Image: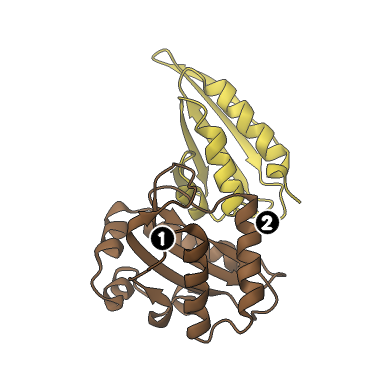
Chain colours: A brown, B yellow
């Protein structure tokens, strides 16, 4: 339920323009700012960059999950970005990252973040689902694929 | 906390252990990544089970689907020539709370 609430059409971008890790993080933060989900851009950006310094959130199979915790948001907010050519995100398996899931959540509560990660992982663990997201022609297609 | 069973089927080493998640925030992205990094050092197959869900111990997204929170138990099975070493390394990682808190 967290996933449906947090990820909406206005926080999905199938057209990520950035070509570096730092840029894609900023671009995703800006999606959340534009959608009115983040008010304090600077602190959100800071917590994501600080988290990324501890260990890259570039996972496997092209998935990256940049995230951070800050009390400048009241509930978990999330964005999804697609860049089919891929970006070097310093991922665990060394492969370029193509699907970016960003979450910003309140500092004092970890439950929603873990639950969100589990929900999105169940979906994107399936190669066919990943392929559908990667080749989606519209945000509606992503919404349908992920059953948001 | 630790239950280890040894078995050898058709000459293949298989060891299983049950370990409680001790770190405060459970299996979120960083612990899952560390788990996979550790598991991937070994050639054996590693399966992680929680409440009837079984995933590969070498898949971060797989591990994240388990929603492993503090206090829950993971059953880890390693199968292959270096199974014992792998289980031991993962036990150490979990007992040390993934080096966080």
Q: Which quadrant is home to the N terminus of chain B?
A: top right
Question: Quarter of the image holding residue A39?
Answer: bottom right
x and y percentages locating residue A94 in the rendered image: 44, 42
* Cα separation between marks 2 and 1: 32 Å
Numbered disc 2: secondary structure? loop
Q: Which residue is mark 2?
A: B25
Question: Quarter of the image holding residue A106?
Answer: bottom right
- Residue at image position (42%, 79%) is A8
- Residue at image position (31%, 76%) is A139
x and y percentages locating residue B100 in the rendered image: 73, 48
Chain for numbered disc 1: A
Q: Is residue B95 visible?
A: yes
Q: Is residue B10 above or below residue A102?
A: above
Q: Is residue B20 above or below residue A138?
A: above
> For this rendering, which residue is in front, B90 or A12?
A12
Chain for numbered disc 2: B
Q: Which residue of the protein is positioned furthest toward the top in this rendering?
A: B11
Q: Is residue A41 above or below residue A47?
A: below
Q: Is residue B52 visible?
A: no
x and y percentages locating residue B20 in the rendered image: 67, 43
Could you say which disc has been placed on residue A108 in the image?
none
Q: Which residue is mark 1?
A: A19
Q: Nearer the viewer, mark 2 or mark 1?
A: 1
Numbered disc 1: secondary structure? loop
Tags 2 and 1 on a common chain? no
- Residue at image position (64%, 58%) is A51
């Amino acid at each position: 339920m967290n996933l449906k609430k947090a990820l909406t059409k206005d926080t999905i971008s199938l057209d990520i323009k950035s070509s570096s890790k730092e840029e894609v993080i900023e671009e995703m933060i800006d999606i959340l700012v534009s959608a009115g989900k983040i008010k304090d851009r600077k602190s959100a950006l800071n917590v994501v960059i600080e988290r990324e310094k501890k260990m890259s959130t570039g996972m496997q199979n092209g998935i990256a999950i940049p995230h951070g915790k800050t009390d400048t948001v009241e509930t978990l907010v999330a964005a999804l970005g697609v860049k089919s050519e891929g970006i070097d995100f310093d991922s665990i398996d060394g492969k370029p990252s193509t699907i970016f899931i960003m979450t910003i959540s309140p500092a004092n509560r970890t439950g929603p973040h873990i639950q969100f990660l589990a929900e999105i992982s169940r979906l994107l663990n399936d190669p066919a689902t990943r392929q559908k997201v990667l080749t989606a022609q519209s945000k509606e297609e992503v919404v349908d694929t992920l059953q948001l | 906390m630790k239950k280890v069973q040894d078995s050898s089927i058709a000459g293949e080493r298989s060891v299983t252990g049950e370990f409680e998640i001790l770190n405060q925030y459970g299996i979120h992205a960083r612990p899952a990544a560390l788990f996979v990094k550790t598991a991937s050092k070994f050639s054996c197959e590693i399966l992680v089970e929680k409440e009837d869900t079984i995933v590969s111990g070498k898949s971060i997204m797989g591990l994240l689907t388990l929603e492993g929170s503090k206090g829950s138990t993971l059953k880890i099975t390693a199968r292959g020539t270096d199974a014992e070493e792998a289980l031991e390394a993962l036990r150490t990682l979990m007992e040390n709370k993934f080096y966080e808190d």
